[in-house]
Image: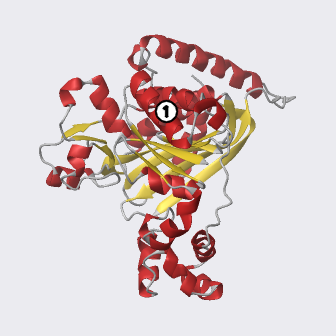
């Protein structure tokens, strides 16, 4: 038996928790420029048609009385960790899939904590007591059904699908409720007359594969109550990246460099928090025509140093010929290795030792920020890579 725990309007709920004056109001979390998108909306704002991923300008139109707040990711991550600590008390198998949701395999935990519904109620109560937030919980024999059921009685509710109820539930389940069915897939399914998961059984596999691709096989399995995806109690991140949609399109290289610097700082700090280093550094650019270009470089010695990440990303930017104004820029890192992994020494230069020295400086700065806040230390503008100063 699997539980899916989904925090209710997480970012907006955290803002209300920290500022009780927002209680009952339309809270919309997202970038403050009209070109940004909504990260989260309170249930009051949702009544006006505001939802996540909606452009901010559209949210302002739909909900002019809304209170727009810039995301505070450090605070959301802090409370997310507190939530996960609660979940790990009830099972050793917890798979966090995003900052505000996780799966828990409670098979065999009944003797310790009671029946599935009892466990769900205990988890919901403890999160509310210790973290101050509400969550909704789905209970089912599979991950996909647990996720679907967690959305049925939102907010602050739970829904239980027993083994015996699975066939009947699947038969009438609307296909748009299935994770992975987007607008394009939904349109194709509707053209075939498939509106529920039970309708899928009317078509042979080869027809569905031809019409909607490999996802057709997944639908056939689900329509036959087959879901082999298990709860994984670990997840390995393969990359860390930050990107910014600019308030205005620009070809001003100094503005772009400033964004690269800020993003390199954030990426480097996250790598050091994860205790990993990156070997590949990537620059992502999207121009005014929404054409996306990426450039990357692989370095000999993996790093978590802001300085090194910034200099390599900046070299990619300086080599890029800007022909159109830029609307989005981002810095990413991949090919991650543990910071405990041995670093290859170079015979004829001391880049490895310089890398470690920069990491020591960064970690010292991290400690100051963690103790006194992000505004306690501000980095001076870094020099261009070719500078000897």
Residue at the location (41% across, 27% down)? Answer: 75
Task: Give the quadrant of residue 91.
Answer: top right
Determine whether 99 is above or below 61 in the image: above
**Number of other residues with Cα within 10 Å of mark 1, as a class: few under 14, some 14 to 19, many 20 or more:** many
Location of residue 211 in the rendering, given as x and y in whole percent from the top left corner = 55, 85
Residue 154 percent across, percent down from the top left = 35, 47
Question: Between residues 261 and 190, which one lies in front from this camera angle?
Answer: 190
The residue sitting at 46% across, 40% down in the picture is: 100
Q: Residue at x 57, y 22 (%)?
A: 389
Farthest residue toward the left?
Answer: 65
* Left or right side of 38 for 65: left
Tell me the residue that label 1 is attached to.
123
Please give left or right for residue 247 compared with residue 281 in the image. Answer: left
Q: Looking at the picture, how far across and down is residue 74, in whole percent? A: 44, 28
The answer to whether any part of residue 383 appears in the image is no
Nearer to us in this view, 273 or 192: 192
In which quarter of the view is residue 277 placed? top right
Between residue 16 and residue 242, name the one nearer to us.
Answer: 16
Specify the quadrant of the image occupied by residue 360.
top right
Q: Assign a secondary structure to mark 1.
A: helix
Which residue is found at the position 66% from the left and 42% from the top? 235
Q: Is residue 146 left or right of residue 125?
A: right
The relative height of residue 270 versus residue 252 in the rendered view (above or below) is above
């Amino acid at each position: 038996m699997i539980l899916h725990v989904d925090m209710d309007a997480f970012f907006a709920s955290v803002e209300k928790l920290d500022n009780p004056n927002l209680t009952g109001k339309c809270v919309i979390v997202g970038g403050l420029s009209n070109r940004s998108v909504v990260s989260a909306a309170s249930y009051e704002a949702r009544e006006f048609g505001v939802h996540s991923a909606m452009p901010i300008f559209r949210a302002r139109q739909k909900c002019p009385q809304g209170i727009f707040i810039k995301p505070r990711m450090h605070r959301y991550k802090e409370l997310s960790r507190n939530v996960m600590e609660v979940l790990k008390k009830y099972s050793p198998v917890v798979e966090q899939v995003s900052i505000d949701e996780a799966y828990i395999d409670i098979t065999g935990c009944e003797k310790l904590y009671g029946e599935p519904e009892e466990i769900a109620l205990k988890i919901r109560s403890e999160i509310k007591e210790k973290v101050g937030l509400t969550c909704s919980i789905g209970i089912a024999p599979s991950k996909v059904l647990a996720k679907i059921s967690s959305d049925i009685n939102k907010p602050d509710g739970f829904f239980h699908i027993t083994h015996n109820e699975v066939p009947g539930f699947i038969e009438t389940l609307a296909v748009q409720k299935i994770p992975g069915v987007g607008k394009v897939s939904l349109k194709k399914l509707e053209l075939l007359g498939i509106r529920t998961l039970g309708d899928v059984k009317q078509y042979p596999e080869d027809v569905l594969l031809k019409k909607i691709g490999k996802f057709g096989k997944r639908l056939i399995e689900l329509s036959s109550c087959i879901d082999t995806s298990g709860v994984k109690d670990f997840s390995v991140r393969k990359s860390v990246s930050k990107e910014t949609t600019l308030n205005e399109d620009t070809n001003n290289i100094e503005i772009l460099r400033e964004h690269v610097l800020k993003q390199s700082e954030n990426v480097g700090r996250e790598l050091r928090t994860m205790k990993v280093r990156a070997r590949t550094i990537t620059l992502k650019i999207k121009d005014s025509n929404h054409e996306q270009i990426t450039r990357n470089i692989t370095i000999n010695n993996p790093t978590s140093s802001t300085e090194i990440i910034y200099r390599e990303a900046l070299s990619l930017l300086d080599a890029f010929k800007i022909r159109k104004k830029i609307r989005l820029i981002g810095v990413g890192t991949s090919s991650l290795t543990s910071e405990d992994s041995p670093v290859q020494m170079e015979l004829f230069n001391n880049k490895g030792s310089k890398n470690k020295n920069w990491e020591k400086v960064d970690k010292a700065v991290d400690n100051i920020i963690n103790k006194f806040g992000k505004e306690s230390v501000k980095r001076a503008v870094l020099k261009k890579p070719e500078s000897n100063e």
